Amino acid sequence: MNEHIVSFVELDKPVINFINSHNLKLTLAKDLSPLNYATVTIMLGWDKHLSEKILNAPNSQLKWIQTRSAGVDYLPISTLNKRNITVTNASGVHAQPIAQSVMADLLYFTRGLNQHVKNTNNHEWQANGNHFVLSDFTILIFGTGRIGQELAQNLQVFGVKTLGVNHHGNPIKGFNEVFSLENYPQALKKANIIINILPGTTETHHFYDPKFFAKITDLFLFINVGRGASVDSDALLKAIAQHKIKYVALDVTELEPLPIDDKLWQIPEILITSHSTGLSYDYDQRLSKIILSNLTSYFTDKTFVRNVVDLKKGY
């Protein structure tokens, strides 16, 4: 059977050259005819409306999906698993952009830039000493994958003590200590900043719930660059109102886009960055390197060398 690739991604020249040199059929998503839905074998990117039509076409030949994102919780995971469709994600593409965005969040609040923005808008020349240096803090990162490791190593340069939480609790470069997920309360006692980078799974849905926030007494900053559904918004708002958390930076929220009348917009202690921390001007070029690696291996020996998702785990 001839391979038919449909792409939602702007591919760079090396990928195009590979496709042409192997005489593969490439169709841009906008040019795909319904008559050809069933012939698609490889999908680069995902669009809910069109991708599900391809997936559900009678006699669909789809066997590999490469996503533009690291998280895959928006995919019909159970269907893909049953049909043995391979999914590879964009893990690694986001490491530097997200880590640097988190560093910006940290400096924004610790160096008092949030107050200076207000002063600028109010035309007020006002200096105060209510600023901190990052080494004053112990930072707890939930999720020690590529993004977490990049961030932890950045923080080490600033002299920050970094704690990590993952499933196994084994030591990882960049972290002073790593705790297993079941033992996270031990780490919580030591931290005054929390950063969530956990993937979106049934296990992490509303992980940050009333019980979690009840364990917090005086948190300087809570940052979420993982998945919006990991945080119970009502519980978070209550924790802020109770002064358990001083500041919050949210790149992701339970509802996206966040409704204009949502309470999260109304809290001055919250910074919302509209799911943009992973973006960069050359995003698709970065992604193309992953695509080319897997195309090369796939058409050599039918294997994938990068970022195969465990569909049973969901990440």
Image (spheres, rainbow, N blue to C red):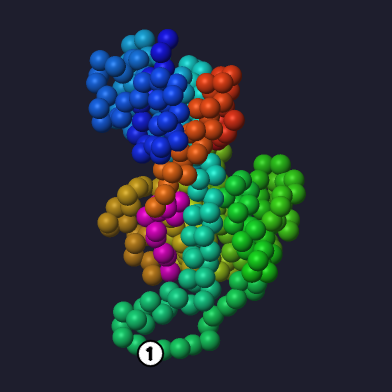
Q: Quadrant of residue 304?
A: top right
**Residue assigned mark 1:** 125
Residue pictured at 29% horizontal, 52% vertical: 259
* In the foreground, 238 or 162: 162
- Residue 28 against residue 102 in the figure, above or below: above
Q: What stretch is highlighted in magenta?
A: 269-280
* In the foreground, 296 or 223: 296
Q: Is residue 216 among what the camera can see? A: no
Q: Could you tell me which quadrant the N terminus lies in? A: top left
Give residue 238's position: percent from left, percent from top.
46, 61
- Residue 254 against residue 295 in the figure, above or below: below
Residue pictured at 40% horizontal, 39% vertical: 12
* Chief SS of the magenta region: loop
Give residue 120's position: percent from left, percent from top.
34, 81
* In the foreground, 196 or 185: 196
- Residue 157 against residue 54 in the figure, above or below: below
